[in-house]
Amino acid sequence: MQQLIMPEESPAQAAFCMDGDYMAPYIPQGAVVLVEWALPEAGQCGLFRTGGQILARQYCEDCFGNIYLLVLNRARRELDVTIPAGETVECLGRLLMEKVPLPLD
């Protein structure tokens, strides 16, 4: 993802250009995504640093403390990331977009 310069009047603190189709159809490839420095709630999307990469994913946590970072394009579900309970992931911010339903698969 490429970081973009933000105008002062923007509600976001950062913007990034999506470099893949893994968040489609909600965020198409090449779209500009606005980010605020806040933690996402379950079902919201955020930017996360894990394994040396920065990923845009939908956040979910189960009752056991396992964290799931999910792609919105379920045809690309192999790109989902599971963080086992007790391990951590760095959240870089919440995407400014409407909440989308969690997948049922």
Image: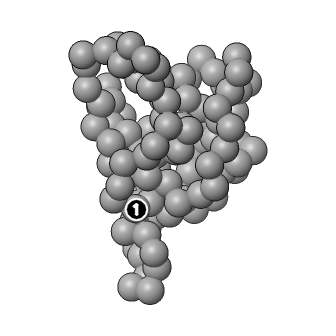
- Is residue 30 at least partly visible in the picture? no
Residue in the picture at 31% in, 15% down: 85
For badge 1, the amino acid type reads Glu
In-image side of 50 versus 22 (left or right): left
Foreground pick, 19 / 38: 38
Residue in the picture at 28% in, 37% down: 90
Image location of residue 88, percent across then percent down: 25, 26
In-image side of 16 versus 102 (left or right): left
| Residue extending farthest bottom | 9
The quarter of the image holding the C terminus is top right
Quarter location, residue 37 = bottom left
Image location of residue 41, percent across then percent down: 46, 43
Residue in the picture at 56% in, 51% down: 18
Residue in the picture at 59% in, 17% down: 78
Q: How crowded is mark 1: few (under 14 residues within 10 Å), some or many (20 or more)?
A: some
Quarter location, residue 84 = top left
- Is residue 11 at least partly visible in the picture? yes
| Residue extending farthest front | 63
Which type of secondary structure does the marked residue at label 1 adopt? strand
Image location of residue 63, percent across then percent down: 43, 17
Foreground pick, 5 / 47: 47
User: Which residue is identified by label 1?
Assistant: 36
